[in-house]
Image (spheres, rainbow, N blue to C red):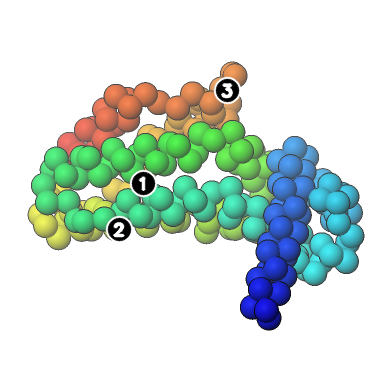
Amino acid sequence: MERRAIGARSARAQAKRTQILDGAQRLFLEHGYAATSTDAVAAAAGVSKQTLYAYYPSKEELLVDVIRRLVEPATDAVAGLAEGPAPADRDDLRRALCRLAEQIMATVMQPAYLALLRVIVAEAPRQPRLAELYKATVPERGFRAVSALLADAAERGVVAATDLDAAARLFVGPLLTYAILDGLVGDGPPRPPAPERIAAIVDLFLRAVT
């Protein structure tokens, strides 16, 4: 009986947290971080300020959770791809990199993700902490995933021993041009690259590192 009561309280708390995050995410992405007050978040979420502060003592903590909710499932998927079996040969590595590139593009071309990027770019000069939060949540995990995959391949002699950080940037950089040119500043909805375009980027990258 007591266990069911605890479970019910936990479910109610999670529902309330989701309610707050829904309201905060909508306001942050529509109006920006600085222009969104905690009063506005409480009103949008349909909760009192006392309740809001019980879950999120600061607006920064609330933003961290909004960022995490937007990107963590995709970045976990990217990390999971890198944690698979080490590539045994060049074909194995090519398949793994294509899957990794497709997952990265699926992440960065989401409308909500692009809206988040716009908020970060607009607010970073006035709120430097936002850029730090974003970098720790998304890019650093992505670079670590690529570096780990390349390190496994290097141990097996599939790629040449090289600067893994530089190699990871060489791989991710061309993909991000699509997010910028065909997402952030493009006309209309985001236009992710076709699978054959991703494969071409992977093949060019492999020429450099194998």
Judging from the image, what secondary structure is the residue with disc 2 in?
Answer: loop
**Which amino acid is tagged 1?**
Arg
User: Does 76 sit left or right of 50 as displayed?
Assistant: left
Q: Quadrant of the N terminus?
A: bottom right
Relative image position of residue 36 (x, y in whole percent): 81, 48
* 186 to the left or right of 60: left
Residue linked to disc 3? 189
Q: Residue furthest top?
A: 187
Quarter of image, res 17: bottom right
Q: Does dot 1 land on a helix, a strand or a loop? A: helix
Q: Residue furthest front?
A: 1
Q: Distance between the Cα atoms at labels 2 and 1?
A: 19 Å
**Of labels 2 and 1, the one closer to you:** 2
Looking at the image, is mark 3 or mark 1 nearer the viewer? 3
Nearer-N-terminus badge (3/1): 1
Mark 1 crowdedness (10 Å alpha carbons): few <14, some 14-19, many ≥20? some
Picture quarter with the C terminus: top left
- Could you tell me if the residues under marks 2 and 3 are in contact, i.e. CB atoms within 8 Å? no
Q: Which residue is mark 2?
A: 83
For the point 88% across and 66% down, which residue is it? 50
> Which one is nearer the viewer's eye here, 45 or 33?
45
Left or right: 158, with 65 as reference point: left
Question: Which element type, helix, strand or loop, lies under badge 3?
Answer: loop
Residue pictured at 75% horizontal, 66% vertical = 55
Amino acid type of the residue that numbered disc 2 sits on in the rendered structure: Glu
Measuring 49% from the left and 23% from the top, which residue is drawn there? Answer: 191
* Residue picked out by circle 1: 169
Q: Separation of disc 3 and disc 1 at Cα?
A: 26 Å
